[in-house]
């Protein structure tokens, strides 16, 4: 399964939308683009593998692998990229401003359900590109 993340870049943050076969699953917020610098930049555009994980800090969340010069890139709940993210992606139900959104946990639940469907049939990839 391939999911597509279409991004818009702003100085205060990066907003996006995740789609599957042209159907919207959720919106996303990320840090602004700062040349892939660890903990202060969103990750580069590209194609990445996605896995489901669970830990004490985030509960159920997603792991993105294969990011150049980066590791530990997650898709986890957050509603303000600058305050809550260090290079990860946060799904949100609604975008409220650049790098900010609302109802992140609800959006993550919906996204995990879709990824789980894909993993039952093989691999899941996230293709990130500019809108």
Image (cartoon, rainbow, N blue to C red):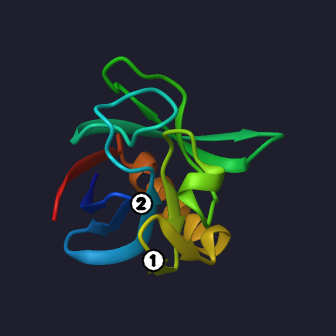
- Residue reaching furthest top? 69
Residue 4: percent from left, percent from top: 25, 58
Residue 127 position, x and y percent, is 23, 48
In this view of the protein, which residue sits in the foreground, 54 or 75?
A: 75
- Residue at image location 52% in from the left, 70% down from the top: 100
Q: Which mark is residue 12?
A: 2
User: From mark 2 to mark 1, how far is it between C-alphas?
Assistant: 9 Å
| Disc 1 secondary structure class | strand
**Image spot of residue 60 (x, y percent):** 69, 50
Q: Nearer the viewer, residue 83 or 109?
A: 83
Q: Which residue is mark 1?
A: 97
The disc at residue 51 is none
Label 1 environment density (alpha carbons within 10 Å; few <14, some 14–19, many ≥20): some
Q: How many marks?
A: 2
Q: Residue at x 27, y 37 (%)?
A: 44
Q: Secondary structure at mark 2?
A: loop
Instruction: Identify the image quadrant of residue 108.
Output: bottom right
Residue 22 left/right relative to 16: left
The structure residue drawn at horizontal position 35% and vertical position 38%, both measured from the top left corner, is: 43
Q: Tell me which label, 2 or 1, sits earlier in the chain.
A: 2
- Tell me whether circle 2 and circle 1 mark residues in contact (CB < 8 Å): yes
User: Would you identify the image quadrant in which residue 114 lies?
Assistant: bottom left
Estimate how packed mark 2 is, as few (under 14), some (14 to 19) or many (20 or more) residues with alpha carbons within 10 Å. Answer: some
Closest to the camera, between mark 2 and mark 1, is 2
The residue lying furthest to the right in this view is 56
Instruction: Report the front residue among 96 and 127.
Output: 96
Instruction: Quadrant for the C terminus, please.
Output: bottom left
In this view, 58 is above or below 78: above
Taking the spot 41% from the left edge, 69% from the top edge, the residue there is 98
Q: Position of residue 80 (x, y in %)?
A: 59, 63
């Amino acid at each position: 399964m391939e999911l597509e993340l279409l991004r818009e870049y702003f100085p205060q943050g990066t907003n996006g939308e995740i789609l599957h076969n042209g159907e919207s699953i959720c919106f996303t917020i990320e840090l602004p683009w700062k040349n892939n610098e660890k903990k202060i930049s969103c990750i580069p555009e590209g194609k990445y593998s996605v896995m489901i994980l669970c830990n004490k800090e985030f509960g159920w969340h997603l792991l993105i692998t294969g990011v150049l010069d980066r590791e530990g890139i997650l898709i986890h709940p957050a509603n303000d990229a600058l305050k809550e993210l260090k290079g990860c992606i946060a799904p949100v139900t609604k975008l409220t401003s650049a790098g900010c959104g609302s109802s992140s946990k609800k959006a993550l639940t919906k996204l995990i359900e879709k990824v789980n469907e894909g993993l039952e049939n093989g691999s899941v990839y996230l293709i990130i590109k500019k809108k």
